[in-house]
Image: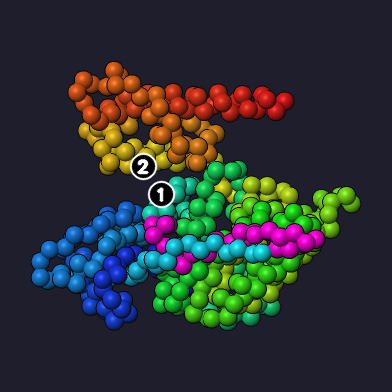
């Protein structure tokens, strides 16, 4: 695993069809064919490209489904600097882990975790469609690679400490959980030669806080026992995602004497289990929180990085709108012949009005905008919606969202 990749390195993620058979046997000839192809035809950066090959010289490339290429330096392309990351998608669907809990003669089935094998079709395209401040995703990915590399090199943890624990915190709807899943997906592609299989285990924090006070700590222990079983195989990379970690790691200093003792047991159990797995070189813990100020200090101290994920800025908002409109053009809902409209004053007004909205809320707007559609607003006999008309709908939907939010806030007072 390369700890210090060159800035000149160009990374190409190559999704290979299952028809290729054993990827390990075909990797070398497939890589050579891709190099020859890139000698004559350069592909765009930061965009997934579906491949359609013709000609006998590229027979083997018919097994390529898509490629995604990125680099810190996109202006100086040299095929000799390309590093190929070949992978096939795992076809096993997400599995829901269920625990049966019994107390006082009663029983309950508790969904404890979601389990994916990566790379998963469910997360294809997620990384490139998450829009944050420049360099944020890349910094977090470099942290994850560096943390795993230190463990693989067996660096003495008593000399150089790294818990391989990343905490993303910030307002709801800003993409923290999606970023963790995209990060795990990308790791599964880049580390395929070091790990044969990558697991993503998303802990259901709310469900583990059982309605029977004595059970929650035990459920945490049972879940991590399952995780320990997977970690025992050093060929497995295990990414543990704890969403809304404050549910399990609520600050013990903030607990009152009236709160159930089980709340403290859960925190203690979680910290104990995190300490027990950090000695394994093939595990990475990803946590998210909407309320970082309520997290126990001992958990915060264990986090190597505490990254704030805020609301999208003006640049990110524009990119989100552009990506959504591009998608609606692709499926022929919108007329695609008015690209210059992005310089229009109306779109500028929409972007300005969108300040303070989360990415999750923004991505709902196209659907909500369609509820305002009236055929009379469009050109006669035109099946597709004109872009300038649709932007009017987006602005209406945005204003309605703002009004509804203000009414909800007023109702709380």
Is residue 99 shown left or right of residue 388? right
Residue 106 position, x and y percent, is 75, 59
Q: For the view shown, which residue lies furthest in the front direction?
A: 105
**Which quadrant holds residue 9?**
bottom left
Q: Is residue 70 magenta?
A: no
Q: Give the secondary structure at mark 1.
A: helix
Please say whether residue 150 is visible from this viewpoint.
no
Relative height, residue 353 to residue 16 (above, below): above
Is residue 127 shown left or right of residue 146? left
Residue at the spot of label 1? 129
Instruction: Out of 174 and 211, give the one closest to the viewer.
Output: 211
Q: Is residue 120 magenta?
A: yes
Residue 36 position, x and y percent, is 18, 70
Residue at the spot of label 2? 323
Q: For the view shown, which residue lies furthest in the right direction?
A: 257
Relative height, residue 193 to residue 73 (above, below): below
Q: Residue at x 48, y 31 (%)?
A: 354
Q: Main secondary structure of the magenta part?
A: strand
Q: Residue at x 53, y 35 (%)?
A: 357
Residue 364 position, x and y percent, is 45, 37
Q: Quadrant of the N terminus?
A: bottom left
Please say whether residue 30 is visible from this viewpoint.
yes
Q: Are marks 1 and 2 in contact (CB under 8 Å)?
A: yes
Q: Which residues are magenta?
A: 101-124
Q: Residue at x 30, y 70 (%)?
A: 18
Q: For the view shown, which residue lies furthest in the left direction?
A: 55
Q: Considering only order in the chain, which callout, 2 or 1, is on the residue closer to the N terminus?
A: 1
Q: Find the distance from the CA under tag 1 to the CA under tag 2.
A: 8 Å
Q: Quadrant of the C terminus?
A: top right
Is residue 308 shown left or right of residue 42? right
Q: Residue at x 51, y 73 (%)?
A: 237
**Which quadrant holds residue 88?**
bottom left
């Amino acid at each position: 695993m390369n700890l210090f990749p060159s800035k000149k390195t160009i990374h190409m993620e190559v999704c290979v069809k299952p028809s290729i058979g054993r990827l390990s046997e075909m990797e070398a000839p497939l890589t050579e064919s891709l190099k020859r192809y890139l000698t004559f035809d350069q592909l765009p950066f930061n965009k997934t490209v579906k491949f359609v090959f013709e000609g006998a010289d590229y027979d083997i490339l018919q097994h390529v489904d898509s490629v995604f290429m990125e680099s810190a330096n996109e202006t100086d392309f040299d095929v000799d600097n390309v590093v190929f990351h070949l992978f096939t998608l795992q076809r096993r669907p997400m599995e829901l882990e269920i625990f049966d809990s019994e107390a006082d003669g009663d029983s309950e089935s508790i969904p404890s975790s979601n389990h994916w094998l990566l790379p998963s079709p469910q997360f294809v395209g997620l990384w490139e469609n998450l829009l944050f401040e420049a360099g944020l995703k890349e910094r977090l990915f470099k942290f994850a690679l560096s943390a795993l590399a230190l463990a693989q090199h067996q660096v003495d943890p008593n000399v150089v400490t790294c818990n391989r624990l990343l905490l993303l915190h910030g307002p709801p709807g800003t993409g923290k959980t999606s970023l963790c899943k995209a990060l795990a997906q990308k790791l599964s592609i880049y580390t395929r030669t070091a790990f044969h299989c990558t697991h993503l285990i998303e802990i259901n924090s709310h469900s583990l806080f059982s309605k029977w006070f004595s059970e929650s700590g035990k459920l945490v222990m049972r879940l991590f026992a399952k995780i320990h079983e997977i970690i025992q195989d050093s060929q497995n990379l295990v990414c543990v995602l704890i969403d809304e970690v404050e549910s399990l790691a609520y600050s013990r200093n903030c607990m009152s004497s009236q709160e159930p003792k089980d709340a403290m047991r859960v925190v203690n159990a979680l910290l104990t289990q995190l300490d027990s797995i950090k000695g394994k070189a093939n595990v990475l813990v990803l946590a998210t929180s909407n309320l970082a100020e309520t997290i126990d200090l001992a958990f915060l101290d264990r986090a190597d990085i505490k990254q704030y994920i805020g609301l999208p800025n003006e640049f990110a908002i524009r990119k989100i709108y552009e990506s959504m409109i591009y998608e609606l053009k692709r499926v022929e809902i919108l007329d695609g012949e008015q690209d210059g409209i992005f310089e229009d004053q109306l779109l500028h007004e929409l972007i300005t009005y969108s300040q303070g909205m989360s990415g999750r809320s923004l991505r709902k707007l196209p659907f909500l905008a369609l509820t305002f559609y009236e055929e009379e607003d469009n050109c006669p006999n035109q099946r597709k919606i004109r872009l300038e008309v649709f932007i009017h709908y987006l602005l209406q939907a945005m204003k309605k969202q703002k009004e509804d939010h203000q009414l909800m806030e007023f109702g709380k007072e």
